[in-house]
């Protein structure tokens, strides 16, 4: 049976058997809902959208049209990886849209995090609508909404591009096959679907991308500082055996500068904030204890390799009182 909301007595999906039952239920429900029509999926390459894609491919095959939008707020190398995995390896019907300038122009001078989320979410819908007009038979929009998205939106903690806020004239019916699952359950389902480990256990990434990790008005140079420092952090975590063991880790570059010294000269540059947390359901989170030697190495690499940065800080705040993302 398929539910619109997570039942209070629902058994948490922790085994392959439970995942397979969920998959069977969802495949049947998707076929019943979609019939012979086409589905448009916002495929970011993250865990949630990847599992939704795999479910839809299993249920309706080539009726699924995946759209990967490069909004200029993705991690380093991410667009290329999405194309390689989904188009080349999984043979998905994938449309790639480079909308970097379009999104960044819309976000110019916008400082409020909720406003930024709404602009990014709204622009996504517009991009999908434009792509849908080029296709015949598109009647459904698939989304990787999960249960914490819905709960946090209902309680006013933050707006989610996957939970509410859709235009009134929206012409698509929503398809949200994992909306009653917690993140750890989505991973179990993804593993049961046969997705590769580097996709299933990929750390979460917000729909608005690096836009929420670049607090204040987004500028291209500060956005690049976020992207480059994030790439260094991910590379070093992988080298030091922390990839897959720490639930989520990323960098933030806030919109303020401080005085430092570089090459014997005064510098006035940004700070990079590192955040690394562990959680089982994304509702609460504890801070990861990063070895001090690794932290020193990260500081050295980031301050020497990332343009415009002279300090590295570490966020020790759990959830609550902070949210997992820093915005």
Image (cartoon, rainbow, N blue to C red):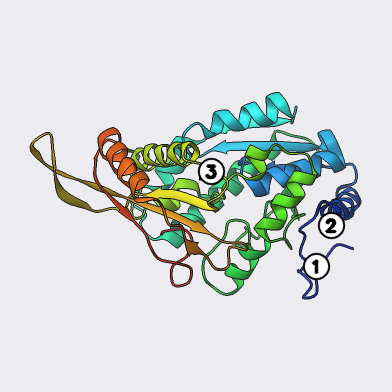
Where, quadrant-wise, is the C terminus in this rendering? bottom left
The reply to whether dot 2 and dot 1 touch (C-beta < 8 Å) is: yes
Query: Mark 1 — residue?
Result: 11
Measure how far apart labels 3 and 2 are at the Cα level.
26 Å
> To which quarter of the image does residue 132 belong?
top right
Q: Nearer the viewer, mark 3 or mark 2?
A: 3
Q: Mark 2: few, some, or many residues within 10 Å (few <14, many ≥20)?
A: some
Q: Where is residue 73 in the image (x, y as percent from the top left)?
A: 46, 42
Q: Mark 1: few, some, or many residues within 10 Å (few <14, many ≥20)?
A: few
Q: Which of marks 3 and 2 is nearer the N terminus?
A: 2
Left or right of 209 on screen, residue 87: right
Left or right of 4 on screen, residue 49: left
Left or right of 146 on screen, residue 58: right
> To which quarter of the image does residue 138 belong?
top right
Q: Position of residue 176 (x, y in %)?
A: 74, 55
Q: Where is residue 60 in the image (x, y as percent from the top left)?
A: 86, 40
**Residue drawn at (58%, 30%) of the image:** 81
Measure how far apart labels 1 and 3 are at the Cα level.
28 Å
Left or right of 322 on screen, residue 61: right
Q: Earlier in the sequence, mark 1 or mark 3?
A: 1
Residue 138 in view: no
| 215 in relation to 222, above or below | below
Element type at mark 3: loop
Q: Which mark is residue 18?
A: 2
Q: Which mark is residue 243?
A: 3
**Residue drawn at (54%, 68%) of the image:** 284
Element type at mark 2: helix
């Amino acid at each position: 049976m398929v539910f619109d909301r997570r039942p209070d007595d629902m058994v948490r999906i922790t085994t392959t058997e439970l995942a397979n039952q969920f998959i069977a239920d969802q495949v049947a429900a998707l076929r019943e809902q979609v019939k012979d029509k086409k589905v448009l999926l916002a495929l970011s390459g993250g865990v949630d959208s990847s599992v939704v894609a795999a479910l839809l491919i299993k249920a309706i095959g080539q009726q699924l049209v995946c759209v990967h939008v490069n909004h200029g707020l993705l991690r380093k190398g991410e667009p290329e990886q999405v194309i390689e995995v989904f188009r080349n390896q999984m043979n998905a019907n994938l449309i790639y849209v480079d909308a970097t300038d379009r999104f960044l122009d819309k976000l110019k001078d916008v400082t409020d995090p909720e406003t930024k989320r709404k602009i990014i979410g709204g622009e996504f819908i517009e991009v999908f609508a434009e792509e849908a007009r080029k296709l015949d038979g598109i009647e459904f929009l698939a989304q990787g909404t999960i249960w914490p998205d819905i709960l946090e939106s209902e309680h006013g903690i933050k707006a989610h591009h996957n939970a509410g806020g859709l235009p009134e004239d929206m012409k698509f019916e929503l398809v949200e096959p994992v909306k009653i699952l917690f993140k750890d359950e989505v991973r179990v389902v993804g593993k049961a679907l046969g997705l590769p480990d580097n996709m299933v256990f990929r750390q979460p990434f917000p729909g608005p991308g690096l836009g929420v990790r670049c607090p204040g008005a987004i500028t291209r140079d500060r956005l690049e500082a976020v992207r480059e420092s994030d790439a260094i952090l991910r590379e070093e975590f992988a080298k030091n055996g922390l990839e897959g063991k720490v639930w989520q880790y990323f960098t933030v570059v806030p919109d303020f500068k401080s005085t430092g010294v570089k090459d014997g000269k005064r510098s006035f540059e940004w700070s990079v904030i590192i955040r690394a947390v562990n959680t089982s359901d994304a509702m609460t989170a504890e801070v990861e204890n990063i070895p001090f030697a690794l932290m020193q190495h990260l500081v050295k690499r980031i301050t020497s390799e990332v343009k415009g940065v002279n300090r590295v800080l570490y966020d020790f705040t759990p959830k609550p009182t902070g949210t997992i993302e820093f915005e």
